[in-house]
Image (cartoon, grey):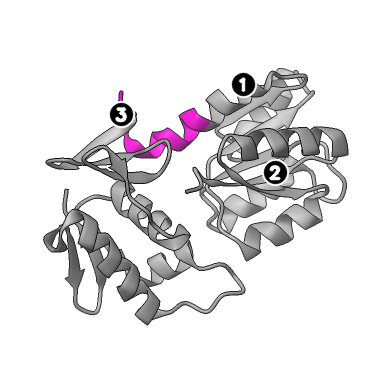
Amino acid sequence: MPKGKILLLEDDANLNDTVTDFLEDQGYVVESAYDGFEAQDRLYESKFDLLLLDVNTPGIDGFTLLKEARQNGVSAPTIFITSLDGIEDLEKGFESGCDDYIRKPFVLKELAIRIDTLLRRGFFHKASNMIEIDKGIEYNTKSNELVVNGEAQTLGNKESALFKLFMKHPNEVIAHERIYKELWDFDEEPSDTALRTYIKNIRKIIGKDRIVSIKKQGYKFTS
C-alpha cells in the first residue's frame, strides 16, 4: 500500500529521476513534472499528499505555483527545493504557503525525514507511528495501514485514502462532497455506490459502529 502520493516539480532531469526513484523505493507514488505549467496541470487533475517543488522552474516558478494553488484550496503540505539562501527568498517561500525548505545539494535521507515529518503532522504529532483504534486494531500513520493483531490489512488505494481522512478528522462529520473531492481525481466520476462499498469494507475491519452514516450529510468516524 503506498505511503502517499507526491507531486515533484524539478526541471533538472537527473535530479528529478534520482529523487523519483528514491521516493518510490521508500514506498511513495510520485508524479514528476519538469516545468511549472506541467505541474499546475497535474495539481488540478489529481490529489496529492505532499508537494515537492523546485523554486526556479520554467513556465511558472515554484513560489507562484504554490501561492495560486493555496488560493484555490490546495492544502497539501509543501517542501521547496532551492539553491537560494537569502532570507528574503526564505520569507517569500513561507509567505507563498510552504511548510518546509530543503537546500541543494541535499542528502536523500534528509529529504525522506522531512517528508515523513510533514505527513505525520496531520496526526497531531503522535510520538508513535501507531494509533490504537480498538483492542487489537491499530492504524500505522507512516505506512497508512490498518493493523489487526499485528497483521496489516489489505485496503484499496481509495479505501486507504478514505480511512486516512477519517483518522485526521475523528468525531467530525465529513460531507459527501468533501470525500468525493479527496478520493476521486479530476477526470474521474465520483460514485456513491463505490463510496458505500469502501465504507462497508472498512467497517468489516474496524467494526460497523465506528463509522456512522449521517443522513444527507456525510460520515463520521468515532474515535
* Image position, residue 3 (x, y; %): 49, 43
Distance Cα–Cα, label 1 vs label 3: 21 Å
Q: Nearer the N terminus, badge 1 or badge 2?
A: 2
Give the residue number, with chain letter if any, for mark 3: 126
Helix, strand or loop for disc 2 = strand
Q: Residues within 10 Å of mark 2 (few under 14, many from 20)?
A: many
- Residue type, mark 2 in image: Leu
Q: Residues within 10 Å of mark 1 (few under 14, many from 20)?
A: few
What range is drawn magenta here?
Answer: 116-128
- Residue type, mark 3 in image: Lys
Count of numbered labels shown in the rendering: 3
Residue 205 visible at all: yes
Mark 3 and mark 2 in contact (Cβ < 8 Å)? no
Q: Main secondary structure of the magenta part?
A: helix
Residue at x-position 39% and y-position 66%: 179
Residue at x-position 30% and y-position 48%: 167
Helix, strand or loop for disc 1 = helix
Distance Cα–Cα, label 1 vs label 2: 16 Å
Give the residue number, with chain letter if any, for mark 2: 8
Q: Residues within 10 Å of mark 3 (few under 14, many from 20)?
A: few
Q: Which mark is residue 168?
A: none
Q: Nearer the N terminus, badge 2 or badge 3?
A: 2
Residue at x-position 47% and y-position 58%: 157
